């Protein structure tokens, strides 16, 4: 362990010497310039894993390992923004991390306050590259002083350019999805004001809903008159109708009529020439109009481009409840066997080059098995033709 520390210090001293630092800086600029000639992922996410293991391995305090991890983040952010990445999302603190020792949690919170303040300063990294800070997660779980630092960083960078740094802190993806569903339910359970309902487009009638409406009224009549011989209306071709309703507009409205049971609270509004039939009662947006895009629009990352690349360091091959919704069929997931404080351009470069090569290959043969959907290629430049690094340098990907 002592030998490893001495070698690490010697390496840092050598790399920090002016001639070497100048040569590496020029080489870095050349490599980034070469990267920019090909397609660049617009949204990259990092699971910054390995800070504590790095600290244990090198015999230093855990907090110092987290500090070194922040230095690695600053370097990677510079590479991302220089090469043209628009959005970087980092997993800074999981809700589950509150289960760690109070000393470590308090130290991480204090470090977050300091680092957020530094990053948001005028002339610093985010200001230079026109990046805005957005802190995503359960902000209600933060202490007032930490929350104040979060809000200040967001405010100071709010007028920066179109680049974004999403800091997930404290965050889990399942909590984000739960919040999105809760917000969607609240939105679709709120009556539409009648003053504005006429301007909301209404979709055509659904036969299944008409049949269900008739059935509900028949059942209601039987309850009122037990001697009635009215029978429930059979709902035929439900599968076909459900298929038809899946293409309806998201602003389809339903009517609530107090005379019916709670199981039939939402009823379809009739309309003729775009006008309601005049049935009184609160109007609701149809719950059948909820789609995947509806939930996406309620996620913390709703204004961001789709996630192109997710990278996790430390050799652990799992997502750990991070970006589960955003990791879609076109997201490339890469696991690297390197601890986060050691992660730098030389580890990141092979990943980007491999990603560029696959994008270029898909352009040439979009129907090849395992390729992304063809539409995803439209967002990248057409002059890409990167190359795959050697077998030894290839990252593990799924």
Image (cartoon, rainbow, N blue to C red):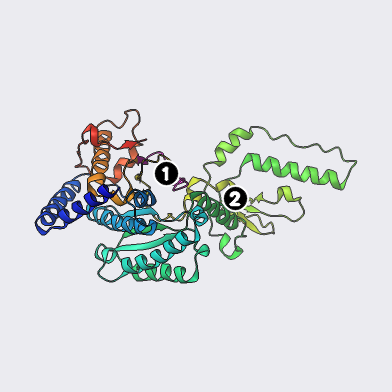
Dot 1 alpha-carbon crowd within 10 angstroms: few under 14, some 14 to 19, many 20 or more = some
- Labels 2, 1: front one: 1
- Residue 22 is situated, as x and y percent measured from the top left of the image, at 11, 57
Q: Can you tell which mark lies on residue 25?
A: none
Q: Is residue 304 or residue 30 the one in the foreground?
A: 30
Dot 2 alpha-carbon crowd within 10 angstroms: few under 14, some 14 to 19, many 20 or more = many
What residue appears at the point 53 percent right and 59 percent down from the top-left corner? Answer: 199
Residue on which disc 2 sits: 286
Residue 293 lies left or right of residue 52; in this view the side is right
What residue appears at the point 56 percent right and 63 percent down from the top-left corner? Answer: 196
Residue on which disc 1 sits: 327
Residue 287 lies left or right of residue 48; in this view the side is right
Q: Is residue 124 or residue 195 the one in the foreground?
A: 124
* Vertical arrangement, residue 276 with respect to residue 380, above or below: below
Is there CB contact under 8 Å for labels 2 and 1? no
Magenta stretch, residue numbers: 320-334
- Quarter of the image with the C terminus is top left
Quote the CA–CA distance across marks 2 and 1. 28 Å
Q: Earlier in the sequence, mark 2 or mark 1?
A: 2
């Amino acid at each position: 362990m002592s030998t490893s520390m001495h070698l690490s210090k010697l390496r840092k001293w050598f790399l920090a010497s002016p001639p070497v630092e100048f040569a590496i800086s020029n080489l870095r600029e050349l490599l980034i310039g070469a990267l920019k000639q090909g397609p660049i992922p617009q949204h990259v996410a990092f699971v910054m894993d390995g800070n504590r293991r790095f600290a244990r391995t090198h015999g230093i305090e855990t907090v110092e390992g987290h500090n070194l991890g922040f230095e690695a983040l600053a370097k990677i952010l510079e590479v991302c923004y220089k090469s043209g990445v628009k959005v970087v999302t980092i997993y800074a603190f999981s809700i589950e991390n509150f289960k760690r020792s109070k000393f470590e949690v308090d130290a991480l919170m204090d470090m977050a306050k300091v680092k957020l303040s530094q990053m948001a300063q005028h002339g610093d990294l985010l200001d230079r590259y026109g990046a805005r800070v957005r802190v995503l997660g359960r902000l209600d779980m933060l202490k007032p002083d930490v929350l104040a630092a979060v809000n200040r960083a967001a405010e100071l960078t709010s007028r920066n350019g179109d680049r974004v740094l999403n800091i997930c802190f404290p965050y889990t993806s399942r909590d984000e999805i739960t919040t999105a569903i809760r917000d969607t339910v609240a939105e679709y359970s709120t009556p539409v004001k009648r003053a504005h309902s006429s301007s909301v487009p209404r979709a055509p009638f659904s036969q299944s809903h008409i049949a269900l409406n008739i059935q509900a009224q028949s059942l209601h009549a039987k309850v009122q008159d037990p001697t009635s011989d009215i029978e429930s209306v059979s709902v035929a071709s439900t599968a076909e109708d459900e298929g038809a309703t899946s293409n309806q507009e998201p602003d389809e409205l339903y009517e609530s009529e107090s005379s019916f049971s709670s199981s039939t609270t939402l009823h379809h509004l009739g309309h003729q020439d775009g006008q309601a039939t005049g049935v009184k009662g609160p109007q609701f947006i149809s719950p059948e109009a909820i789609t995947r895009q509806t939930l996406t629009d309620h996620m913390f990352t709703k204004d961001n481009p789709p996630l192109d690349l997710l990278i996790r360091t430390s050799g652990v091959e799992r997502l750990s409840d991070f970006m589960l919704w955003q990791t879609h069929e076109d997201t490339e997931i890469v696991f690297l066997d390197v601890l986060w404080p050691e992660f730098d351009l030389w580890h990141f470069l092979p990943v980007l080059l491999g990603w560029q090569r696959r994008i270029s290959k898909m352009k040439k043969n979009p129907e090849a098995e395992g390729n992304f959907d063809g539409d995803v290629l439209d967002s990248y430049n057409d002059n890409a033709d990167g190359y795959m690094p050697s077998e030894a340098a290839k990252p593990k990907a799924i």
